Image (cartoon, rainbow, N blue to C red):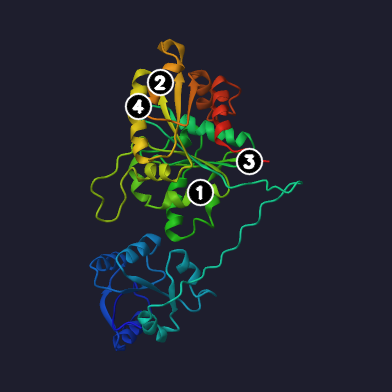
Amino acid sequence: MVDRVVALIVASGAAWEPEALRLLGDHPRVVVLKRCVDLDDLLAAATAGQADVAVIGIDAPGLDRIAVDHLRANGVRPVAIASGGATLDGGRIRAGRIGIRSVVTDDRLDTLADLLCADDQPPTQVRRPEAPAPERPPGGRAATVPGRVVAVWGPSGSGRTTVASALAAEIARRRRPAVLVDADPYGGAVAQQLGILDEVSGLLAAARLEASGHLEDRLGSVQRGLDQHLSVVTGLPRADRWVEVRTGTLDALLALARARAEVVVDTGFSLEEDAAPDLGGRPGRNHLTLAALDAADEVLVVGGADPVGLSRLARGLVEVRERRVGAPVQVVVNRMRPTLGWTEREIVAMVSGFARPSAIHFLPDDQPAVDRALVAGRTLVESGDSDLGRAVARIVDGLLPPVG
């Protein structure tokens, strides 16, 4: 037991609030520091570092995993008050999903003060249905294995979105589940490129579900299926909406998706970190790109084969090397054509002067194949056989481990 507990409380006008205030005020070990008018007021008060516990109505507007993480980061332990008759679990599943371990129902408020004073409360156990075991074909080996995360990054104008879409489509063509995630914080183009008329951004929907603790249960709702094996998480509809995707959203999305499929991430062009983080806890604009690189099993750095593209590629390789110290990357030289006047061997020598990639791939300048797919709103695989499609298939050969 602790000597004294300083508590904050926010109830949003709930019926249990007067009784809770009376019980806490009468308890010799509890000091109610402030009755907060809303969640923002509670988070601001917690930042002052004077409170030990926050008593929160489970239905308080804005209460999500981000708010709970903010409280814990400031040393404030959240305790939720739930309706005793509303659900069979007393609100514990909802609380557990957003990270609140202690829950008291409104018909047992007499236990609230003692719970606040106890410092050895065990975490709330949230029971989830177990995922079914993968089916095994004759011979005994599982037909599905956990996937890999492949981040496709490149400087502006390199064609990384075209490459990312083609890679995902080729993986799906091999009957491997594939998820293409548009994580460009400057406004995604995957949906437009593939002809997806989706009014709801999959990335923004994932951000809302992750904040409320429901992303794992509703992962399928943020994906748009293109065929039996390929689905897409569409990106931001406007560039200014990057602020709605909080830190940790993409990490959670990729971790859940890779458990079921191969994941290809189309990233932004910038790796710059904000020098001065937002005071409200908002991440920097490029946190989506940086998170994708950090979570990736393989990083493909895409650059153009022309003088401007190669110059940007060289600078980009230095940036990626500083971000992924010691981790190998693969280089994709896009739109390679003989009219430029240099050979693949000369480009390899240039690239090797800036980095030691594990592989260097060359994609031909096959504009007719790209145009056919783009005008029809289809993937490169769907638009028919092409030199570019065969070159992408060779990249996938090196990315995917063989499956029995």
Tell me the mark number nearer the camera, choosing from 4 and 2.
Answer: 2
At 57% from the left and 27% from the top, the residue drawn is 394
Q: Earlier in the sequence, mark 1 or mark 4?
A: 1
Tell me the mark number nearer the camera, choosing from 3 and 2.
Answer: 2
Marks 4 and 2, how far apart at CA: 12 Å
Residue 248 position, x and y percent, is: 40, 53
Q: Earlier in the sequence, mark 1 or mark 2?
A: 1
| Secondary element at tag 1 | helix
Count of numbered circles in the view: 4
Q: Which residue is mark 1?
A: 222
Residue contact at pointers 4 and 2, CB within 8 angstroms: no
Residue contact at pointers 1 and 4, CB within 8 angstroms: no
Q: Earlier in the sequence, mark 3 or mark 4?
A: 3
Marks 1 and 2, how far apart at CA: 43 Å
Marks 1 and 3, how far apart at CA: 16 Å
| Secondary element at tag 3 | loop
* Amino acid of disc 4: Ala
* Amino acid of disc 1: Val
Image disc number at residue 228: 3
Tell me the mark number nearer the camera, choosing from 3 and 4.
Answer: 4
Q: Which residue is mark 4?
A: 314
Residue 130 position, x and y percent, is: 61, 61
Query: How dense is the environment of label 3, judged by Cα within 10 Å: few (below 14), some, or many (20 and up)?
Result: few
